[in-house]
Amino acid sequence: MPIRVKRIYDPPDRSDGVRILVDRLWPRGLSKDRAQIDDWLKDIAPSDELRKWFGHAPARWPEFRRRYKAELAEKSDLLKTLRARVQAETVTLLYAARDTERNNAAVLAEVLRAP
């Protein structure tokens, strides 16, 4: 099944399948009704320390990816559960960042797609 990555502020679509928010903080200015999420996995998001260090600075992106992958390696139970879900149905990983290419959901999708 496909893994999709999408900004939570983009309109929900039927093709999204299961919508999972993968940010530690709730997105600003968005009601829970409007978000239409099926799950919120705060614990799979980057640590507060890493999130604050990155600050969405493009120059820090390669190091952020490396550090976040290291954090994910320590969350094998969460990854196992999420991989099982991805194998069973379409999953859309939702994030709030403005950068559509350099965000934690993109890294998480990369990890989930790896063999």
Image (cartoon, rainbow, N blue to C red):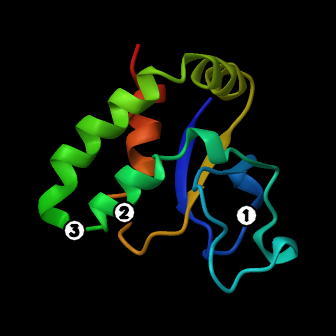
Instruction: Please say if 33 is above or below 2.
Output: below
In the rendered image, which residue does mark 1 sit on?
13
Q: How many numbered callouts? A: 3
Q: What is the C-alpha distance between the residues marked 3 and 1?
A: 30 Å
Q: Residue visible at 62% across and 68% down?
A: 8
Amino acid type for the residue under numbered disc 1: Asp
Q: Residue visible at 36% across and 39% down?
A: 68
Q: Quadrant of the C terminus?
A: top left
Camera-side residue of 82 and 24: 24
Q: Residue visible at 36% across and 62% down?
A: 52
Amino acid type for the residue under numbered disc 3: Ala
Check disc 1 and report its element: helix, strand or loop.
loop
Check disc 2 and report its element: helix, strand or loop.
helix
Q: Quadrant of the N terminus?
A: top right
Q: What is the C-alpha distance between the residues marked 2 and 3?
A: 10 Å
Image coordinates of residue 97 in percent, x first then y, are 45, 69
Residue furthest front as drawn: 49
Q: Quadrant of residue 55?
A: bottom left
Image coordinates of residue 9 in percent, x first then y, are 61, 76
Q: Residue visible at 61% across and 74% down?
A: 10
Tell me the crowding category of disc 3: few under 14, some 14 to 19, or many 20 or more residues within 10 angstroms, Cα based: few
Camera-side residue of 72 and 93: 72
Image depth: mark 3 or mark 1 in front: 3
In the rendered image, which residue does mark 2 sit on?
52
